[in-house]
Image: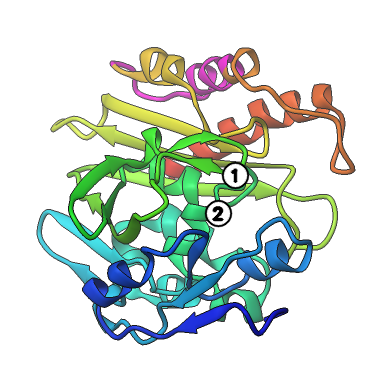
Amino acid sequence: MQSTETEFLVPTSVSEALQSISKEDAIFLGGGTSTALLYKTRLIEPSRVVWLGNVGELKGIFASDGEVKIGSMTTAAEIAANRDIARLLPGVSTASGVIGNARVRAMATLGGALAHADPRQDMPPALIAVGAEVSVKSSSSSRRIPLAEFYEGFLETVLAPDELITEVTIPLVANRRSAYIRYTPTSEGDYPTVGAGSSITFGSDGKTIEAASVVLCGVGSVPVTSNQVSQLLVGTAGDDATLRRAAEAVRDIVEPQDDERGTAAYKREMASIFAFRSLKSCLGS
């Protein structure tokens, strides 16, 4: 830390952590992969840092018949290596396995990644596409928030200063398939130009789509969800022509900006292309 005036606390329980955050300008610290960058550039200068590494109740992956729960201090590497996640939620498994590099994945935590709210991150679109919800607590309350409603803008979420993400819950849906695919023109460890998380759920006949979702990162100030994709796919068999029409609809809702990864026009086209490829991946092709 830069200053001896900054307190560094190491709680061993959620309740202790929530009591520790009461000081003004205090922050929670997970793996530190995002926080360290913000601290280095002085975008944040906390008076107290509450490190969550010793809070065991925030760690782990638990799969039941109806849902999967992932503790907020579970690392990207642990999610990527988990067999239940790979089997039940392949899109989430893929997204967690392409974050940064092996060293970043070994440190980066799920809760920290979601709270950081960089719209280029891989995990949010994959999680939103499968209906993930975020559980948060403060010293006086708790609530569960659909991840699709969690982001308010660039580096902004609905979290109050004294709230902590404790876990993420993902419902398991019969006949649902999911995928995540990304494109980056530079190194594999870089943020993607565009990333697309998707899910397709078939009805009892196994042939007719009854629900579908595409969520994109890198092309707006928050993860972008296309409701029109679902409207165009529900009731169809998901043939290539229908998938392409649905994917083309994302061009009208994304709001990319020019940067070193490409122009806004380029990203808009890439969003459509990768939405199609992600949907196609859900069908195993």
Mark 1 lies on residue: 155
The crowding category of the residue bearing disc 1, from other C-alpha atoms within 10 Å (few below 14, some 14 to 19, many at least 20), is some
The image quarter containing residue 169 is bottom left
- Residue 256: percent from left, percent from top: 73, 27
- Along the line of sight, the residue nearer the viewer: 250 or 41: 41
Circle 2 is placed at which residue position?
116
- Going by the numbered disc 2, the residue's amino acid type is His
Give percent across and percent down for residue 109: 47, 70
The verdict on residue 251 being magenta is: no
Residue at (53% x, 76% y) in the render: 31
Real-space Cα separation, disc 1 to disc 2, in angstroms: 6 Å
Q: Which residues are magenta?
A: 235-249
Q: Is residue 170 above or below residue 149?
A: below
Say which residue appears at 48% left-offset and 47% top-offset.
124
Q: In this view of the protein, which residue sits in the foreground, 262 or 174?
A: 262
Q: Amino acid at mark 1?
A: Leu
